[in-house]
Image: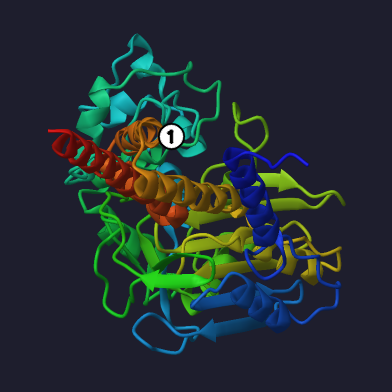
Amino acid sequence: MTTPSRPVRLLRAAAVLLILCAAPGVLPGVAAAAPADADPRVSVQAYAQRFAVPATVAVVLDRDGAVTTVPHGTTSDGTPVTADTSFRIASMSKAFTAVAVLQLAEAGRIDLDQPVAAALPGFTVADPRAGDITVRHLLAHTSGLSNQDVDEFALPPAASAAALVERLAQVPLAADPGTEHQYLNANYVVAARLVEVVTGAPFGEHLREAVLAPLGMTSTVATDRCDAEVPGLARGHIGALGVQVAVPEIPSFCAGDGGVVTTAADLTRWTRFQLGDGTTRDGTRLLSAAALRESQTPAPGTDGRYGLGWSVRTADDGRTRVLHGGALATYASGIEMSSAGSAAFVLTDVSGGNPGALAADLVARADGAPGVPVDDPYRTLNLALLGLTVLAAVLLGTAVLRARRRAERLAGRLLLPALSLLAGPPSATAWTLVAMLLPLSGVLALVLVLGGTAALVARSRAARATHASAV
């Protein structure tokens, strides 16, 4: 009987490893949808356990106005989660910016279909079509700007919204304005800067006075930096394989696009407003019902999938779903509202997981519709990264032990791609973001670099020893 070669044996071992990793309990997989009458508390607790979420809170608002709040776990500073615990909500902040802009439009201070360049002195891009970009295009992500051309993670981060607007002067357009939806955070930073110019106030200050305070959202702030320190806000987490580590958020500028820090209690007030007719609970009108509905209706050029600050989808049973997710390196969140009248949101203090899917599941069951499976969008990547990491460690360990010429060639072949991997992202912050969202990618790169270096050193020492003995 022929004995398989060592490479074949290693590949078989890697295959076995991947099968073991795919087994239940090793990495979160796809969870079957819960029964329609399942208790939200059970769903939230199961989610937190499956994804090893240290701190989370979910809120369900049913069609009759009843509110169910489900806190779970403790923050990184050891504080039990309550409805008053602060969370970063990242891109869920965009809907707040949209409301601020729509308010100014209804007051006649902004024209949604006016060129941005006419309303915002100094705004331009490296394209003759710059004058065609309107305020509406910014809010619908149809400005023509693309994240292929805008390095949103460049270091140092922009010092202000005005500074980021200046950076865009060197950026070309990827499409005609108004014709193609390309999600880009910078669109909302420009919108925030427009609010500052029109009102004469910092964006966060204006948002507090015009939107947050009237809604009673007294524990909510809008920061200019995603990594800004906020009183009462604990550090979020990164993690993999059930291990979570509290770390600082990546430095980045996010005024208008992702800087809101809020609580479940405050976000419940916000969600009620979004489900309503544009008035606060005491009857104060913040926005016309028509403008509020427009923000939740697909805008031209978005292929029916995005309004003004909101994604829009149609459920299999015909319900309209208005939703948005939020993801930073250390926090993730999701919110969904249904045309049937219910809503839910989920706030977590860890990157990864799938809070948007959990929110969709909670809403569907509140509507009496079939539940939604909550899967792990990073599962396949983590499986591949884990398998590659172990395989690389085995191969490089063999290379170090044998220190032969073949091992030297192997080390070089693995080391150079690893160095290219580290140099590949457009910026150091982009690489850091990848490593934080997928920590196993950082482990793999580290194994390749250190293991490859060790193999080369071992080969060099072996060669010197051979040369010395021959003299």
Query: At which x and y percent is residue 67?
Result: 66, 81
Q: Residues within 10 Å of mark 1 (few under 14, many from 20)?
A: many
Could you tell me which quadrant the N terminus lies in? top right
Q: Quadrant of residue 338?
A: bottom right
Pinpoint residue 25: horizontal percent, then vertical percent.
67, 71
Residue ID at (43%, 42%)? 105
Classify 438 as above or below 241. above
Does residue 397 sit above or below 371 in this rendering? Answer: above
Q: Is residue 310 left or right of residue 261?
A: right
Looking at the rendered structure, the kind of residue marked 1 is Leu
- Seen at 64% across and 60% down, the residue is 21
Name the side, left or right, on which 184 lies relative to 459: right
Q: How far across and how far down the image is residue 459, in percent?
A: 28, 39
Of 353 and 272, the residue lying toward us: 353
Instruction: Look at the image and tell me whether residue 348 can be seen.
Output: yes
Confirm whether residue 192 shows in the render: no
Residue 68, placed above or below residue 385 = below
Where's the C terminus, which quadrant?
Answer: top left
Q: Secondary structure at mark 1?
A: helix
Q: Which residue is mark 1?
A: 138
Q: Is 34 positioned to the left or the right of 138 in the image?
A: right
